[in-house]
Amino acid sequence: MNFLLRALRAPGRPLALAVLVLAIAIRIWDPVPLQELRLRIFDVEQRISPRTPLGQTSPVRIVQIDDESVAKYGQWPWPRSLIAKLADRISEGRPSVLGIDILFSAPDRTSPPVLARELPDLPAPLAAALAQLPSNETRLAEAIAKVPTVLGLELTERDAGSAAAGATDPAAALPRYLGVVQSLPAIAEGAQAYGSITVEPDVDGVFRRLSLAARYRDRVVPGFAAAVLAVSKGQPALPRLRPRSGGVDVAIGPDYLAGDPTGTAWVYFARNTPFYSASDVLDGAVAPGELNDKIVLLAVTRAGADLQRTPLGLMYGIEFHAQWLEGFLSNTLLTRPAVAFWIELAAVLVGGLVMAWAVRYDKRVVVAGALAGAVLAFPLGELALFRFAGWLVDGIYPAITTLACFGAMLQGSLRSADRARRTAEAERQAAEGEQRRLQTELQRREGELAAARTIQLGLLPHRFPAFPERSDIDVFARIEPAREIGGDLFDYFFIDGNRLFFFIGDVSGKGPPAALFMVMTKELVRDASARHGVALDRLLADANARIAAASDDFAEEGGDMMFVTAFAGILDLASGEVVYASAGHDSPFVIQPGVIQPGGALRQLATEGGPPLGAVEDFAFPLDRDRLEPGEILLLYTDGVTEAQDKAGALYSAERLSALLAGAPSDTAESAVLTVFEDVRRFAADAEPADDITLVAIRRVGPSP
């Protein structure tokens, strides 16, 4: 028992087993999305390996009343006398059966007796003569009586929920319909049998199966293809049913057609079936011998009528029946046996358990092999069953489940390895503790400062372009940290759809306290912006009061009083208006891209300003306004730029910065920032940096009003 509990607690195994149980439950439930996935995979198999087309050796021929026929013999519907002539031509070829996928449910208004009644202006002798002639329906009935004929009928008004799968009577599992559309009795009396042409798509609207039998009220009706097959073999078309595990068999003489529980059969599609135009048959262009002993199907295909979606693309409804007949007669059938569900369930179970129990996740080769097996084994097995046995079995869902269990186990193993690594690292560090304690205070402090610096910089915006979804703003920022932890910070975000809030600041002091105060300041400013929105004066007043209170707390705990020089503003991208205020910070420059300012005169935002944030608890910061024209760049910076020193101790200075910006125009926010950084780096050369260097450039890209 303890061994089993330890095994169940193996890294990732509880999660993998939970994934497996969930996968089994989903497969038993079998929701519609899973059904659609399975059907689409079956379609891919048919496209990869379609049924071999029989061509002219096919036992099935389709005679189509197509656009060519309609153009030559007149618009559809044709007179029944012309269809009778077509049936006569077909019967001359002595086919084994003629299946007609056309409903003659209304009287022919061109029939002679009908004309005699409906044309009152006809001379009496002519009307009497027409009345004595046989009707077109009689003519068609006589024509189809010359050859074994199956007429199609359409079942309508399906009785939802009427099928009872697993019932003792196999007919109870068949779909039940309450309505029927069929040919007139005067025509039907010439046919040997009838069959249902009703075919319903799967849940995704694709036609893959046809009905072998259905129910009209309480009477079992054969499917059209099944009736045609029976008559071609000289057998009665009355369906006899035999229950089978996972389906219903429909008897055709001594043979049984295997159907699923609702009496439908899968169609194994090929890419073509021999077609003849009705006009060629009527004109004698088709030799009678080409139809000899063939199954001939007659249908209307004019103007793309009755086109249906199939795994191989659009096909005519009559071709749907022909494809199944070809597959049955050539013994190349598709079936989804009852055992398919259990195969799939077993595959899910085996794949999940193998991943959860058998794979050694500490062996890279074994893990790679398991992954390859999970990806390939089940789909290849599915394809093999399809290709060599004609079975439709889903191997993709077991593969997906196996991969999910693999992922759960791999994640757990990686976490366990990481914990083991960290434990070993901790033990190693403990063993080396005495040596570490002997390290100098400077080394320890540098390590701590480096870690703190990494965390500090990670809290500032660092992805560019800053707003890739917007084309009206170009923002770029960069911070060059000194060895000492400083308090430089910046932030920018949209307050609403058009207003960009920007902020740059420099916390007094150095080291971890300044870094912590920087993080707190950034969050306080963000919180104040959420409270006050575009009211920049209230925003700064709120942030100032809270920063002052935090500074007092620092002082009470033995630290120094802290304050923050800052420059904040709101840019309206629609109008270009900039509302801003300074809290003891250097004013930013406005650069006109592509223009060298004459005499070095560079525009700098004028501001009355106020004390640094946190220096005076209750202070109303005055607001100033300016306008940023399209293409102009607003460049904000901290004093780390102007106070950068070379080896001799000389300062970079604001004058040098102004001269640089005036003489080196920039067209993008990034180029403006990088131009300054490169010049400061050249100036400082190999001198040790004393402070962070931070620059933020904001370019308004929008068109001029």
Image (cartoon, rainbow, N blue to C red):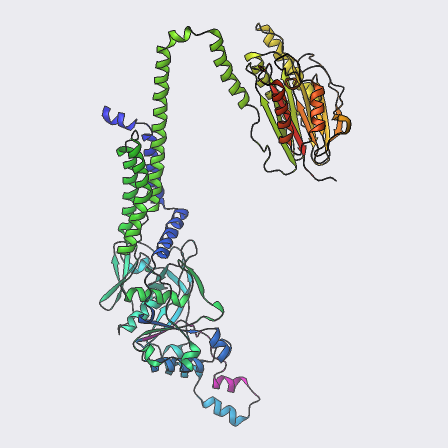
Residue depicted at 51% across the width and 14% down the height: 449
The x, y position of residue 18, in whole percent, is 34, 34
Left or right of residue 264, residue 581 in this image? right
Residue depicted at 49% across the width and 92% down the height: 128
The x, y position of residue 447, in whole percent, is 48, 14
Along the viewing direction, whichever of 456 and 119 lies nearer the viewer: 456
**Res. 210 visible in picture:** yes
Magenta residues? Answer: 97-121
Q: Quadrant of residue 687?
A: top right
Q: Quadrant of residue 412?
A: top left
Left or right of residue 499, residue 299 in this image? left
Along the viewing direction, whichever of 338 and 417 lies nearer the viewer: 417
User: Residue 374, relative to residue 52: is it above or below?
Assistant: above
Locate the C terminus by quadrant: top right
Along the viewing direction, whichever of 448 and 154 lies nearer the viewer: 448
Locate the N terminus by quadrant: top left
The x, y position of residue 94, in whole percent, is 31, 80
**Residue 516 is covered by the magenta coloring:** no
Residue depicted at 51% across the width and 20% down the height: 454
